[in-house]
Image: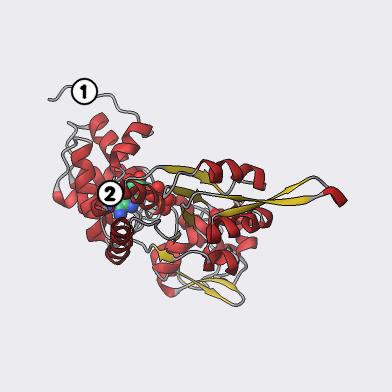
Amino acid sequence: MREPVLHSTVSTPDEDRALRPQHVRDMVGQLDVCARLAIAVDSARKRGDTLGHILFDGPPGLGKTTFATCIPRDLGVACQIASGAVLQAPKDLLPYLTNAEKDSVLFIDEIHRLPKGVEEFLYPAMEDFRVDILLGEGVNARTINMQLRPFTLIGATTRAGLLSAPLRDRFHMREHLDFYTVAELTEIVVRNARKLQVEVAADAAGEIATRSRGTPRLANNRLRWVRDYVTSKADGRVTLGLTHAALDMQGIDSMGLDGQDRKYMETIVRIFHGGPVGVEAVAHTMNLAVDTLVDEVEPYLLRQGLVIRTPRGRKVTAAGYTHLGVTPHEPPDPQRPLFS
Ligand code: ADP
């Protein structure tokens, strides 16, 4: 029997930092994206020039922030981090722009949340490294131009569709991050198990990867939970059987869907007869924000073909019904609980 080790189920910031790749070459998967970034970074270094602005888009947890923080490290330049959610006026953005050192990176997460006025303030900063500041009001108002040091803007968004065309077009590179394969997630689990110093059987690593919804962040969360489970219930070694038990206990099914994913599909099936139904109606029924459904829940279900989008709304597919174990259009069974 090993010495019992105390772990918190909630990851510590240190642990998160330890699992996050530090350089683009350490990233698993997204090979095309990595190859293009390596060329752009190499070229900027060789030319001694500023790297062009880059936009990353894709569902949460696929590596947008990780890429954005690896790039300045690879370039050997400073990085400032801001979020579109808090940059609500040009005055909020101005300090970041004036502080930016030559060739440094400014990373703006959730860039689709920038209000129009801040977006417009950003255009000349991105294009000509200058900002136009309005001083005074009314007839006394005048604009002064302020020159900035050349910098690289890296934007990340879960909703590229919400960005205005002028902002999108000012990025020199646009990279879309897609869900990871099971093989890629298995590699991430194996590497991170080593970093967390936990022994994981090969088949157990594959199972954690299979049940991670194609998302590295979830693979890390599932790995940490299984680690906690085996530490508490067994001798700290992760076997396939213990992995099944741990993930079942969290309500994560064989495809990696969690209770919220299934509740979303069951709401469409049982309340809206399989759809088509507008996402707003589903969100209201589930008492969830529309953004949560659109950003976090739907992308993987759409990708797996369990749900489709039609002009009239969302519909659960035959594969979705099969996964839920429900026959299409069966009359509601009053004995069956609405949500399992
Ligand atoms: P996003 O910004 O897209 O929401 P993050 O960059 O924060 O996602 O990624 C979440 C976590 O997933 C990171 O902390 C990192 O540990 C892991 N991760 C993401 N992409 C990769 C990758 N390509 N290889 C290894 N780990 C990754």
Q: Quick one: 182 or 29, which is closer to the camera? A: 29
CA neighbours of label 1 inside 10 A, class few (<14), some (14 to 19), many (20+): few
Q: Which residue is mark 2?
A: 23
Vertical order, 14 against 68 (above or below): above
Mark yes or no: residue 14 visible.
Answer: yes
Label 1 is placed on what type of residue? Pro
**Disc 2 marks which amino acid?**
His
Q: Where is residue 34 drawn, in percent x and y?
A: 29, 61
User: Closer to us: mark 1 or mark 2?
Assistant: 2
Residue 183 position within the rendered picture, expressed as x and y whole percent measured from the top left: 22, 60
Does 331 appear above or below 3? below
Name the residue beneath numbered marker 1: 4
Q: In the displayed structure, does residue 146 sit left or right of residue 190?
A: right
Is 31 in front, or is 220? 31
Q: Is mark 2 within 8 Å of ligand 1?
A: no
- What residue is shown at x 52% (from left), y 53% (from top)? 337
Q: Is mark 1 within 8 Å of ligand 1?
A: no
> Please, what secondary structure does the residue beneath circle 2 have?
loop
Determine the residue located farthest toward the top in the rendered image.
3
Residue beneath the point at 55% across and 59% down:
128
Q: Quadrant of residue 326?
A: bottom left
Specify few, some or many for label 2: CA neighbours under 10 Å numbering under 14, 14-19, or 20 or more.
some
Q: Residue at x 84, y 48 (%)?
A: 140
Determine whether the residue tagged by mark 1 lies in a helix, strand or loop: loop
Marks counted in the figure total 2
Q: Residue at x 24, y 31 (%)?
A: 231
Q: Is residue 325 visible?
A: no
